[in-house]
Image (cartoon, rainbow, N blue to C red):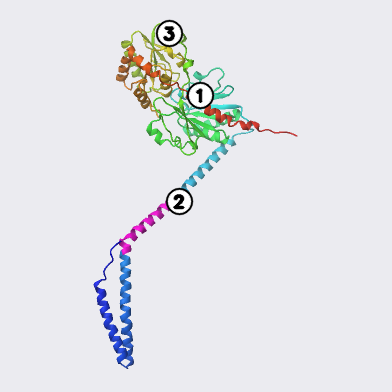
Amino acid sequence: MAPSRMPRPGFSRVLAASAVMLVLGITLALLTVSALALALGTVLIAGAWLVPAMYAVRYRTQAQFRKTASGEDVRLAQRTLGASIKQVREQTSRADNRQDRALKRLEGTVRRLEVMAGEIDAPSLRPSLDILFVTSNGAGLGHVSRLLAIAEQLPDGRTYELLTLSAAYRQVSTPGLTVHYFPSSGATGESPSRWNRLFTAHLREMITARRPRLVVFDGTWVYTGLTEVCRAYAIPLVWVQRGMWKAEVDESSTQRHSARDVADAVIIPGDYAGDEDVDCGPGITPAHVAPIVRTARADMVGREEACRKLGLDPSSRHVLLNLGSGVLEDGESMRETAIRVLRAQMPDAQIVQVVSPLAAPPAEHESVRSVSAYPVMPFARAFDLMIAAAGYNAAQEAVSLQIPTVLVPTESTRTDDQVRRAEGLAEQGLTLAASTPEEIARAITLCAEEQNLDSLREALEHVPEAVGAAQAADVLEKRVSSTAWIDRAETVYG
């Protein structure tokens, strides 16, 4: 509590003068009979009371003003005013957010109406296809391979088709699988806005004709047209979202952390290199599954059969060079370094390279034999060592299928953090990692000694097999089954 203030010296003088005025006034009023003297005495008596009172009021007002101007009241007023300003701002912000959400809903409604406006004489709403799998373009066949891995684990009788933007669509075509190809924006040279309108129209025709119960997309960015068409037709959209994103891309992705705006569910495949906890934003809890690979250990054929299928000599050692299209900038120099060191350190080994369907054929080399096989992993027992790009699929297959591997990451990919993946697996002793020609030379030199390959094999023996494809298929099956009620809709004619 602040100490009380002492009366100011001037106040004593005022009291003394008031006392004198009071004495004079009483004297004049009592001892004189003159009217003028009586009036003057009355004025003096009144002034004796009024002057101190006015002085006291003035002093109190000044004291209160000083207290308000410099004391706790100012701080209290500041806090009150600050709280009021904050409250107004919060109310304004909530109002703006409500307005933004309302505008988004209206825009979404308008887009869905535009989508539906293009439909004439639509067929029955009864689905004729269980799942339509959709993939983005990508640098290779990773998106396609993941979705096909999941599709092949669906229960018998489930029907599915594939719509892909990958130019290697013919490579993945197999008997019984319907593959639809739509050229990507990059492949056509169209502007993204015009391409998206054309893609939306194409997808609308397909959805109208096939009426899938569920749409599953694998890619890093969900196309606007895909979301619009699925929501216009009330078809759930599931986003398979490969993990291990680069930190800066993850932070800037509005879709990844507000997934409800573009999808209805999210599946995140695991990665042997490390676990991730992805925040998809309000409204969606992602389904985290184990790593996804297309080839199971039971699908791998024996060494002799694998060599025979690939046209290799079973009595020789073989090294699989699988840098693929993922090593975009330094791939050739890394490839040449790998070939040179392999010839020097493992002269008895046959070098076999996989020719990517998306890349130009590599330069011919007398020491290298080229094969074009998709998928190639069922024949992995033909190889003593694999040198592969550190993309998601190759890395998971190397670990799950227990193949001694040197992973070669590239930093040129936009989203996939291959360096973090390669280093994470190397730290666990499951693979070797090489980011430079010097590092790949060192890694191959180590692998030329059989005891080092045995150490890798021993570490891989303790790794559980990847079962993420089956787990993801279970998630999709529950989604598909939840739409079965629509089949009970019927019309009874009397």
Tell me which residue sits at (34%, 92%) in the image.
35
Q: Amino acid at mark 1?
A: Ala
Q: Is residue 182 visible to the viewer in this orientation of the structure?
A: no
Tell me which residue sits at (44%, 10%) in the image.
303
| Residues marked 2 and 3 touching at CB (< 8 Å) | no
* Element on which disc 1 rests: helix
| Residues marked 1 and 3 touching at CB (< 8 Å) | no
Q: CA distance from mark 1 to mark 3?
A: 33 Å
Q: Position of residue 90 (x, y in %)?
A: 43, 50
Q: CA distance from mark 2 to mark 3?
A: 73 Å
Q: Position of residue 281 (x, y in %)?
A: 46, 38
Q: Specify few, some or many for label 2: CA neighbours under 10 Å numbering under 14, 14-19, or 20 or more.
A: few
Q: Which residues are magenta?
A: 67-90
Whichever of callouts 1 and 3 sits on the residue coming sooner in the sequence is 3
> Looking at the figure, which quarter contains the N terminus?
bottom left
Question: Which residue is identified by label 1?
Answer: 470
**Residue lying furthest bottom in this view?**
33
Q: Position of residue 341 (x, y in %)?
A: 31, 14
Q: Amino acid at mark 3?
A: Leu
Q: Specify few, some or many for label 3: CA neighbours under 10 Å numbering under 14, 14-19, or 20 or more.
A: some
Q: Position of residue 483 (x, y in %)?
A: 59, 32
Tell me which residue sits at (31%, 11%) in the image.
345
Question: Which residue is identified by label 2?
Answer: 91
Residue 73 is covered by the magenta coloring: yes
Q: CA distance from mark 1 to mark 2?
A: 48 Å
Q: For the residues carrying marks 1 and 3, which lies nearer the camera in this image?
A: 1
Q: Nearer the viewer, residue 147 or 76?
A: 76
Q: Is residue 381 above or below residue 87?
A: above
Question: Which residue is identified by label 3?
Answer: 312
